Amino acid sequence: MSAYFSALLKIIIICQLFNAGLGYAKSNKQVVSIAYLTQQQKIPPTLSNLDPFIDNKGELGAELAIKDNDTTGQFTKQSFILKKFVVPVEGSVVDTYAKSVAGKFDFVVLNLPPAQVVEIADLPAAKQAILFDVATSDDALRNEQCRSQVLHILPSRAMRADALAQYMMKKRWKKWFLVVGTAPEDRLYADAIKRAAKRFGMDIVAEKTWEHTFDARRTAQSDVAVFTQVDDYDVLVVADEQGQFGEYLDYRTWNPRPVIGTQGLIATAWHRTHEQWGAVQIQNRFKEAAGRWMEEQDYAAYLAVRAIGEAATRTKSNALKDIKSYLFSEQFALQGYKGAPLSFRAWDGQLRQPILLAAPRSLVTVAPLEGFLHSKTELDTLGYDEPETLCKRSAE
């Protein structure tokens, strides 16, 4: 019996030493902490049973990126931690940031509407952090309302409109009929379309505001055909970001014309039909983990966390100054599964990236298209270039 207990004691000691070694190795790693801040949304009215409401867009993309960061971090002795803060519908995002995030995290992923992004960025406690905006496409946040510590991951509306305009120019479909919804976001999208039309020499032959019913049966029977009796045009460009009527336009117009914009052929950062440049692998990994397709905000949150990871592993540092400096350096290049390395524009904090032009069930092409040249990178043919920017970013 004594020999048995002696052997058992040896095993216990060995296990303790092994666990202590693991603990030391883990504690010896450089830790990079990232905060993820979002707010629960009220479930909107159901527009289609085909598109169920997804309440965690972004969150699962960030989690997938943490795993990828940790894989690389094994070789640089770094560990990445994601702390999620989900504010209730009636809660205060500002209070949550001030109490739980400020002073504790240098890197913060914001999955919030435009007004809240600005509100957080203007907090004195947020001035010394890097904020990654993964939910907005507002051009104003990249121009007159820009903030020096905010980096924008999703393409702006101007980038999306320019991507569509490049393809329309290549197809020589230059006469546009613009249909705009009544929501403020629809008007912002329409403004981006008008800017792109002017930039690429397109002609908006007609513009109308959709003020009809959103009832699909009545729309299908009469409204669209009557509404679309205008001068001849090549394409109908729809601005309906809420998806209230845009899907009803295709195949119901007076003249047989393709639909582009927020419905029909869309310009997007990510799409489930995208399979090139290793995209199929990340699509499958995400779907296996989440049980659904990766959405734009998932992709944006993934890129934000991966950008932090890329900068941290390259600099072998978790210091805010080192990572921020690297993010804006010429050496920074992020793999985005879209055929070209992604990087940040120094003048407005926008992530430059290719944009997918996709129909509901097929990827049509990727912008920028061949032939659209730029002195630095063709990616800067999309959206506001440096000479056009209204952003006054500080030099800090």
Image (spheres, helix red, strand yellow):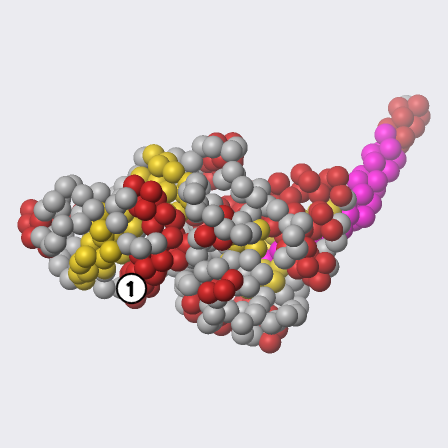
Compared to residue 65, the image places residue 89 above or below, namely below
Compared to residue 333, the image places residue 37 above or below, namely below
Q: Is 323 left or right of 7, judged from the image as shown?
A: left
Q: In the image shown, does 236 or 359 lie closer to the viewer? A: 236
User: Residue most toward the bottom?
Assistant: 124
Compared to residue 255, the image places residue 210 above or below, namely below
Coordinates of residue 356 in the picture (x, y in percent): 41, 43
Q: Residue at x 28, y 54 (%)?
A: 202
Callout 1 crowding tier (Cα within 10 Å): few <14, some 14–19, many ≥20: some
Coordinates of residue 260 in the picture (x, y in percent): 27, 47
What residue sits right under mark 1 in the picture?
187
Q: Residue at x 24, y 56 (%)?
A: 203
Q: Amino acid under label 1?
A: Arg
Specify whether residue 48 is in view.
no
Q: Residue at x 31, y 46 (%)?
A: 168
Question: Quadrant of the image for the N terminus?
Answer: top right
Specify whether residue 258 is in view.
yes
Q: Secondary structure at mark 1?
A: helix
Q: In the image shown, does 64 or 211 lie closer to the viewer? A: 211
Tell whether position 231 is magenta.
Answer: no
Question: Quadrant of the image for the C terminus?
Answer: bottom right
Tell whether position 12 is magenta.
Answer: yes
Looking at the image, how many numbered discs can be counted on the residues?
Answer: 1
Choose top left, top right, bottom left or bottom right for residue 136: bottom left
Coordinates of residue 60 in the picture (x, y in percent): 50, 46
Coordinates of residue 70 in the picture (x, y in percent): 67, 42
Q: Is 331 left or right of 90, judged from the image as shown?
A: right
Q: Which residues are magenta?
A: 11-39
Q: Residue at x 69, y 40 (%)?
A: 72
